[in-house]
Amino acid sequence: MTTRTGPIFTKVALLGVGLIGASMAHAMRRGSLAAHIAGHAHSEATRKRADELGFCHSIHADPKEAVRDADLIVFCTPVGAFAEVAAAIAPALKQGAIVSDVGSVKMAAIRDIGPHVPTGVHFIPGHPIAGTEHSGPDAGFAELFDGRWCILTPPAGTDEGAVTNLAEFWRGLGSRVEIMDAKHHDIVLAITSHVPHLIAYNIVGTASDLEQVTQSEVIKFSAGGFRDFTRIAASDPTMWRDVFLNNREAVLEVLGRFSEDLSRLQRAIRWGEGEMLFDLFTKTRAIRRSIVDAGQDTAASNFGRDTKKR
Amino acid sequence: MTTRTGPIFTKVALLGVGLIGASMAHAMRRGSLAAHIAGHAHSEATRKRADELGFCHSIHADPKEAVRDADLIVFCTPVGAFAEVAAAIAPALKQGAIVSDVGSVKMAAIRDIGPHVPTGVHFIPGHPIAGTEHSGPDAGFAELFDGRWCILTPPAGTDEGAVTNLAEFWRGLGSRVEIMDAKHHDIVLAITSHVPHLIAYNIVGTASDLEQVTQSEVIKFSAGGFRDFTRIAASDPTMWRDVFLNNREAVLEVLGRFSEDLSRLQRAIRWGEGEMLFDLFTKTRAIRRSIVDAGQDTAASNFGRDTKKR
C-alpha cells in the first residue's frame, strides 16, 4: 500500500470522534496529513475518552469552536444529527473551506447539511466504505481505510480543485476514491451494505424469538453460519437506525427484490427443485471469487479467524 | 486445547474425503487416533488428489473395500449420496463396528443409512458444527474441529459403550460433544446454519440481478457488509442443495418466521418507527457478545481479517 504523506490541509475538524472519526485522526497522523486535528463530540464521556487517547490536537464541546479556521470539516456523527450540527457550525465556517461527511446516505447529507453551507464554502459529501462492528473512540485505528473505497458525491458545479484536494486527502488516509452521483450511491449502498445489515439484524432477532431452540443452543452451535451474521448485527444501533430512516426508498426497493427472490427459493425447496438451487449456489460462488480477486476480502478460509490455514 | 491422543479405533473408514473427511484424517493423525485410515471417493480425480496428499493409509474406489474390517465408518459424502453408499457397504460391515456420518440433516441420515445397517452394527449419526467455504481434499486441515461442537444423535436403545467411544473419538479430534435428539438437531441447525446459508445465497443472487447496480460496483463496494455474506454463499453447491432438499420442513418453518420478522422491519422502515429499529439493533448486539464469550467466534474486529487491530 503506498499512501501519500505530507500536509494537505492545515486544520481538519472532525465532528464526531467514534470509530470513523478516530480512525481518520489516526490515519491523518500516520500520513502527517494535517497540522492540527480538532475534534468535537456531543457527549462529555466521549470527549474525555478522546482526550485521553490523544488522537486529536484539541477537543471541543462546541462544534463551532472545532470548525473555526478549519480547511476541512468532516461530519462523523450519525446521519440523524447532521441538520442540527450543520446549523450550529454554519456561522463559523471559513471561506474556501471544504465541508464533507462520512455518512452512509448521501441524499440525506445533501438534504440536511447542504442548505446550511454558506456561499464560498465547498460542500462535497463523502462515504468511506469501511468499518467494523465496534464503535466509539477506542475502536479507531489507522489502517481502517487501507485498500477500501471512499465514494465522493460532489453536487453538479462543485469546484474541481476542492474535489481534487479531498480525493487526495482520502488517498492519503489509505483509500481508493470513486466519484459518483448521490442518488446512485444510495441504491448501490442499499444492496452492498444497508439490506445486508437489515437481514443480519433480522435473522439474529428471529433466532432469539424461536420457542423450539434455546438461546444457549443458538450460541453454542453458531459456527454453522449464524455467527457470521452476528458480527454485522453488532454494529452501532444509532448509526443504523438513522441509515434505515434516511435511505428508506432505496432500502425498501432492494428489500422488495430480496423478498421476491427468497420466495422463489422457498418454493424451490418446497417442491424439491434441486437443479434451481444448485445453479444459484454455483453462480454465487463466482461472485465471492471476484471480491477476493478485487482485494476486498481475504482468501483465507473462515476470514482467517479460526486458524492459520489459508 | 487439550486433546486426547492414542488409538481409539484400529481402522477408520472415511466415505468421502472432501473438506470434512480430509480434516478428520489430518486430526486423527495429529492425535494418533487410528492405526489405519481408509478413504473412499466416488470421483477418480478426488481419489488421485487424496492419494497425493497422503492423509489416508489407503484409498478405495469401491466403498466396500474401504469399510472392510473397519471399527468406525463415517459417511462424509453429501447427504444425497447416503442411501446408495449405505446399500453398497452393508454386506461388508464388521460385527460390532460403529457407523456414523457428518451430514447436516440427521433425520435424513436415519432415513437413508439406518435401514441398511445390519444387526450387531451400531448406528450413531453425528454432525460436527465446523466448516469453511472451501471444499475438496485440499481444503482439509487438522484444526478444523478444535473448540467446535460435534452433535451426536443416537437413536433410542443405542449401545452406550459405542456412544462413549464415538464421543471420545470426536474429543480426540478437538471437538466438544453434545448428545441430542435427531429431530431437534434439524430445527436447531435450520436456524443456526441452514437458513443463514439460504439468505446469504439469496442476497448474493439478488445483488447480481439488480439492473441499477453493476456487478463491478457490488464487488468494489462489498466491504460495507455484503462481502461477509459471499463467504457463506461460496460453500459447496452439491452439499447445500442436499441440505435444503432433505431438511425441508424445518427450513421452511424457520424461513417463515424470518420472513414474518422481516416484513415487520420493512413496515417499521416505511413508517419511520425508529425506536423499534433501535431496540432490535441493541438486542442483537448482546447475542454477538455471548457468542464471543462462548469461544465460538473471535473478538477481533472484522473477524481479524483486515488488520491486526483487536
Image (cartoon, coloured by chain):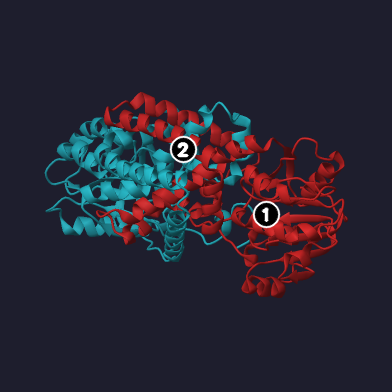
Chain colours: A red, B cyan
Name the residue rendered at 13%, 53% in the picture.
B156
Residue B255 seen from this side:
yes
**A297 in relation to B213, above or below:** below
- The 10 Å Cα crowd at callout 2, few under 14, some 14 to 19, many 20 or more, is many
SS type, badge 1: loop
The answer to which of A236 and A234 lies nearer the viewer is A236
Instruction: Give the residue type at disc 1.
Output: Leu
Q: Mark 1 or mark 2, which is nearer the start of the sequence?
A: 1
- Whether residue A206 sits left or right of residue A250 in the image: it is left
Using the image, name the chain to which the residue with label 2 belongs.
A
What residue does disc 2 label? A255
Disc 1 target residue? A144
- The residue sitting at 54% across, 58% down in the picture is A238
Alpha carbon separation for disc pair 2 and 1: 29 Å
Query: Where residue B206 sits: x, y (%)?
Result: 48, 32
The answer to whether one can see residue B51 in this image is no
